[in-house]
Image (spheres, rainbow, N blue to C red):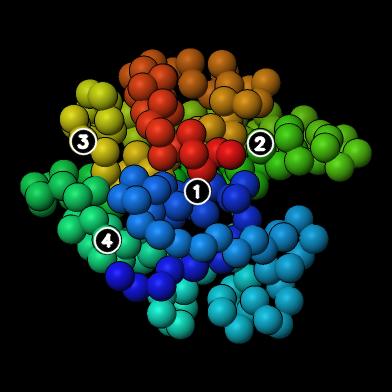
């Protein structure tokens, strides 16, 4: 069994995706926090692990791996025998398509804008930029509709077993569900709402929210 360390803060969506794979498979690992609110991700010591200053970085027996899509596929193969990757090639492609939609089209408006403006800025004494939030809502709706269009949501995104696509989307939707914009962003994708109600009960997900 390799020695695994996840470098990153527990509150990060991508750290949660990574940890869910480890939790689901009962794989021992260490979580080494990186304080992204104070800028620790840009300190030379962390940049030596991840030159782009993002979290997470996975450390495996002293080797560093970054980019969550690479980490997720590595861990699924290394500790889960590929159990979170569908066998059917088109379903596998759908999984990667959903992961890419989260990366390219959902994360920015959902986390960098809505979550930061609604949850982080006020917690640090600032004022929410409501114009930015209003502009982000249709972008989130578009991304969620695109995911719903290719998902089965019965009960997981791509069928009756959890795939990496679920582990990617859950932490992002969690933050949206805690904002006042939740009804607005989810109202046009009722199947994803049903998916969320079921998938969010996964014990590994509840564990990484702690
Ligand atoms: N492409 C990266 C994105 C990771 C990412 O954006 N992580 C966020 C936290 S969820 C982060 O590092 N934020 C700190 C920053 O942008 O300075 C990946 O897939 O791992």
Residues under numbered marks 3 and 1 in contact, where contact means CB atoms less than 8 Å apart: no
- Of labels 4 and 2, earlier in sequence is 4
- Of labels 2 and 1, earlier in sequence is 1
Residues under numbered marks 3 and 2 in contact, where contact means CB atoms less than 8 Å apart: no
Give the foreground label among 4 and 2.
Answer: 4
**Viewport quadrant of the C terminus:** top right
Which residue corresponds to mark 3?
161
Front in this rendered view, residue 3 or 117: 3
Identify the residue shown where x is 76% and y is 65%: 39
Label 2 C-beta lies within 8 Å of the nearest ligand 1 atom? no
Give the foreground label among 4 and 1.
Answer: 4
Q: Quadrant of residue 35?
A: bottom right
Q: Describe the element under mark 1 as helix, strand or loop.
A: helix
Q: Describe the element under mark 3 as helix, strand or loop.
A: loop
- Of labels 3 and 4, earlier in sequence is 4
Which residue corresponds to mark 1?
16
Which residue corresponds to mark 4?
79
Give the CA distance from mark 4 to mark 2. Answer: 34 Å
| For residue 142, side relative to residue 93 (left or right) | right
Which residue corresponds to mark 2?
114
């Amino acid at each position: 069994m390799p020695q695994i360390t996840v470098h990153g803060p527990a509150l990060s969506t991508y750290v949660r995706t990574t940890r869910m794979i480890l939790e689901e498979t009962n794989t021992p690992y260490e979580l080494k926090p990186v304080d992204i609110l104070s800028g620790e991700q840009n300190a030379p010591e962390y940049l030596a692990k991840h030159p782009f200053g993002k979290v997470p970085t996975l450390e495996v027996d002293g080797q560093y791996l970054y980019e969550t899509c690479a980490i997720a596929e590595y861990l699924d193969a290394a500790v889960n025998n590929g159990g979170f990757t569908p066998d059917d090639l088109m379903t596998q492609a759908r999984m990667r398509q959903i992961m890419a939609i989260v990366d390219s089209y959902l994360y920015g408006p959902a986390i960098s804008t809505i979550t930061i403006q609604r949850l982080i800025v006020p917690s640090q004494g600032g004022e929410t930029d409501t114009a930015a939030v209003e502009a982000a809502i249709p972008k989130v709706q578009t991304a969620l509709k695109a995911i719903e269009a290719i998902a089965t949501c019965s009960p997981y995104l791509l069928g009756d077993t959890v795939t990496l696509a679920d582990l990617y989307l859950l932490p992002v939707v969690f933050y949206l569900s805690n904002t006042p914009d939740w009804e607005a962003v989810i109202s046009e994708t009722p199947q994803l709402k049903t998916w969320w109600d079921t998938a969010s009960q996964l014990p590994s997900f509840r564990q990484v929210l702690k």
